[in-house]
Image (spheres, rainbow, N blue to C red):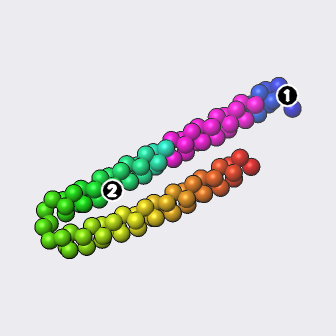
């Protein structure tokens, strides 16, 4: 193999490594965007639930209806928390397995 071919191979290898690094950085940015979006969705949902509870407390005068409504909202809140935790675990597990695969 002559010098020109060696330099061509080296240049191609460097180009491939640069593409892999760029792809990895793009994936990390995408993951961060997804995390931020997920976090914002959780915060918005939390605010909505709190607003519902405040609205019920301030507008509903029947104590039994108020109690039942707050119980329903709290059950919804618990379900959402459970769903969020499951999603977070799946998301984290998926990321871990993807990172291990990429490293190998």
Q: Residue at image x 20%, y 74%? A: 64
Left or right of 4: which side holds 98? Answer: left
Classed neighbour count for the residue bearing mark 2: other residues with Cα under 10 Å, few (<14), some (14–19), many (≥20): some
Q: CA distance from mark 1 to mark 2?
A: 64 Å
Report which residue position mark 1 lands on: 2
Left or right of 61: which side holds 16? Answer: right
Q: Position of residue 33 (x, y in %)?
A: 45, 45
Q: Is residue 80 above or below residue 19?
A: below
Q: Quadrant of residue 27?
A: top right
Q: Position of residue 15 (x, y in %)?
A: 66, 34
Q: Main secondary structure of the magenta part?
A: helix
Q: Is residue 12 visible?
A: no
Q: Residue at image x 70%, y 32%? A: 14
Report which residue position mark 2 lands on: 45
Q: Position of residue 74 (x, y in %)?
A: 33, 66
Q: Are marks 1 and 2 in contact (CB under 8 Å)?
A: no
Nearer mark to the viewer, of 1 and 2:
2
State the residue lying farthest toward the front.
63
- The residue range painted magenta reads 10-31
Q: Position of residue 16 (x, y in %)?
A: 67, 38
Classed neighbour count for the residue bearing mark 1: other residues with Cα under 10 Å, few (<14), some (14–19), many (≥20): few
Q: Quadrant of the N terminus?
A: top right
Left or right of 49: which side holds 90? Answer: right
Secondary structure type for disc 1? loop
Q: Earlier in the sequence, mark 1 or mark 2?
A: 1
Q: Is residue 64 above or below residue 33?
A: below
């Amino acid at each position: 193999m002559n010098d020109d071919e060696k330099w061509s191979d080296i240049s191609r290898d460097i180009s491939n490594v640069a593409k892999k690094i760029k792809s990895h950085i793009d994936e990390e940015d995408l993951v961060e965007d997804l995390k931020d979006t997920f976090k914002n969705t959780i915060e918005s949902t939390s605010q909505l639930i709190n607003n519902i509870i405040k609205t019920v407390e301030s507008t509903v005068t029947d104590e039994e209806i108020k109690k039942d409504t707050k119980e329903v909202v709290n059950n919804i809140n618990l379900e959402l928390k459970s769903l969020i935790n499951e999603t977070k675990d799946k998301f984290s597990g998926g990321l871990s397995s993807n990172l291990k695969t990429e490293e190998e």
